[in-house]
Image (cartoon, rainbow, N blue to C red):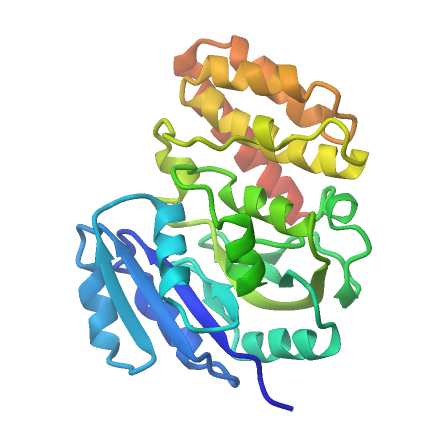
Amino acid sequence: MKSPAISVVVPLFNKRDEVGATLRSVLAQTLPPVEIVVVDDGSTDGSAEVVRAIGSPLVRLLVQSNAGVCVARNRAVAEARGEYIAFLDADDCWEPGYLAEIAALIAEFPGCGIYSTAFWVLDGRGRFPVPCPDRRGVVDNFFRDSAHRYISIPSASVVLRRVFDEVGGFPPGMKIGEDLYLWVKIARRLPVCFSPARLVCYSKTAANRSAAIYTPEACDCSFEALYDPAAPIEEREFIARAALGKALVLSAKGGTEEAARAVRTFSFTRTYRRTLRKVRVLNVLPVAWRTPVLNFYNRLAWLLAKKGL
């Protein structure tokens, strides 16, 4: 059976120390992609030179002024030739069998909008699993089954190019939660397929992860606008999770009113009451306290999660 045509798109911003290993992990795939489209989004640290030094005919480098990760990904997709688009952040890596497993999923479970696998988290001390479904195949209910588990993250997901174009791609200007925003729009239209094989390594250690360098967004899209009060409760809860998780970061950076708006809109949640309470507590603290308090909580939660608690 003919393998699906998969293009890999890599948005790049100041990842000089990581992007070489990322691209080599793609070139080491047992099933190679048709191309690797890298969009350097205004890097200032020589990242583009690392990409050029790879010297593979599969790698195509595009350079633009800094416009954000959504614009970089959308441009890469627009330039890509594949029927399927594999996303990979410039500091994450794939195991050699990742694209082969994605191709097997496409052959066994055709007609899905997203194909994803489980992944490892790298935190500088080792790699650790995170909660994911344990069943291979079409997910029964993406929104319900994502509660407290990870089904799709960008570096472990491949999307059908046609549906990506139909829903309009990533929301330009959004810096936090842009992947969840896209998953909602796709999962409303088509099923999602998942493999529990852990074939991706997601790095928590990079200095310029979007949540670490947040500045106010200039975006016409929002989770409040995406929310449909008439939708099934599972979908509404998923959007609440995305919006409240984003509100934590907004509040920590001083976005008090934005966070308060999310609390007002998504106060109905039952699945994510803990996150709702965290946003409410954080939002009443002095702004100078919020980031240290949130960082402490997140470090403690990660340590407990690693111990299975």
Left or right, residue 135 beside residue 123: right
Residue at image position (53%, 13%) is 283
Left or right, residue 211 beside residue 30: left
**On screen, 199 above or below 205?**
below
Residue 225: tell me if it is visible: yes
Q: Nearer the viewer, residue 125 or 223?
A: 223
Give the residue furthest to the bottom: 1
Residue 121: tell me if it is visible: no
Percent x, y of residue 288: 39, 14
**On screen, 47 above or below 243?**
below
Percent x, y of residue 41: 27, 51
Quadrant assignment for the C terminus? top right
Quadrant assignment for the N terminus? bottom right
Left or right, residue 71 beside residue 53: right
**On screen, 28 above or below 94?**
below
Percent x, y of residue 70: 40, 47
Residue at image position (35%, 68%) is 37
Residue at image position (74%, 77%) is 108
Q: Nearer the viewer, residue 240 or 96?
A: 240
Residue at image position (61%, 21%) is 278
Count the labels in the image.
0
Percent x, y of residue 262: 58, 21
